[in-house]
Amino acid sequence: MWWVILIGAHDVVGVSGCFPSAVPSQPSRTLRLGNTEIPYELIRTKQRRRTIAFAIEGREGLVVRAPMKASFKSIEELAQKFSRWIMGRLAELQDVAPPRPMVGGATVPVLGQELRLRVLTGSGRRPTCARIGDALEIRIPPHVPSDDYSRAIRDTVMDWYCAFAEEDFTRRADAWAACMGVAYASIAVSNPRARWGSCSAGNDIRINWRLAMAPPALLDYVIAHELCHVVHKNHSRRFWSRLAKVMPDWRERRDELRRIGPGLSLEGI
């Protein structure tokens, strides 16, 4: 008997714990769900637990993490059992907007507000980014090769997001912790592929930097969710009850995050 974990595109996975160490992914395979051929990436994990995880990871689609001893047959039989969930999550990706071009005049979201990119020539040795009113002003040194221009803009904007997130997430976590009467050990900005947040056994909280793009209500949902794990290291009835006391509309926020989550990305540019 295999245990199954289902992870949507950047679903919240509360209690921390990265996936076990893995061997390189195997060549893509396909499985038939109904009348549809679904490609998937299989990653074998060096674990003893009988756990198979089906994850919808951003634009990559279906990724399966399974122990070395799990057969293709058992993996694909389980995929059939959870085909409704898999197909539903993959369908959500169809509504995701294409990657944003990283050029002057394009826009990126910051806490749900669109900011325009203003690209200028800088005099420093490294690219810089700063928020000026309703724009992100990026200055690229003239020595940056034209072939690297778009990548330089993307990396500089991402660095700005991470710095912004570190300050904003800490402020929000402190406010929510006081409201909920809990104390966390630390908070850090992270860059995982398939989770929005985590809380370790020692109450160290990690929040995905991409939430700096989301409307504040959705960011607050993830922070409150992880703070609940300070008290309840699981998703028990008591966990959800505690969350509902401080955030009665958590389901609506979660569903909206699932809907827009795959589009909160600078990838593919």
Image (cartoon, rainbow, N blue to C red):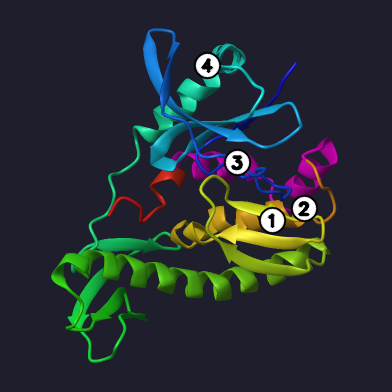
Q: Is residue 58 left or right of residue 3?
A: left
Q: Secondary structure at mark 1?
A: helix
Q: Is residue 223 above or below residue 60?
A: below
Disc 3: which residue:
22
At label 2, counting other C-alpha atoms closer than 10 Å, the crowd grade (few under 14, some 14-19, many 20 or more) is many
At label 4, counting other C-alpha atoms closer than 10 Å, the crowd grade (few under 14, some 14-19, many 20 or more) is some
Secondary structure mostly taken by the magenta-highlighted segment of the chain? helix
Depth check: give the residue in front, 40 or 225.
Answer: 40
Is label 1 in contact with label 4 (beta carbons under 8 Å)? no
Q: Secondary structure at mark 4?
A: helix
Looking at marks 1 and 4 on the same chain, the residue that comes earlier in the sequence is marked by 4
Report x, y in % for residue 206: 64, 60
Q: Is residue 23 above or below residue 175?
A: above
Distance (Cα) linking label 4 and label 3: 25 Å
Depth check: give the residue in front, 205 or 110.
Answer: 205
Looking at marks 3 and 2 on the same chain, the residue that comes earlier in the sequence is marked by 3
Name the residue: 75% across, 66% down: 177
Disc 4: which residue:
83
Q: Is residue 96 above or below residue 160?
A: above
Q: Which residues are magenta?
A: 235-260
Q: Amino acid at mark 3?
A: Ala
Q: Amino acid at mark 2?
A: Cys
Depth check: give the residue in front, 182 or 61.
Answer: 61
Distance (Cα) linking label 3 and label 2: 29 Å
Disc 1: which residue:
224
Q: Is residue 263 above or below residue 90?
A: below
Looking at marks 2 and 4 on the same chain, the residue that comes earlier in the sequence is marked by 4
Q: Amino acid at mark 1?
A: Ala
Depth check: give the residue in front, 18 or 11.
Answer: 18
Q: Amino acid at mark 4?
A: Ser
Report x, y in % for residue 199: 73, 55
Say which mark, if any, is on residue 228.
2
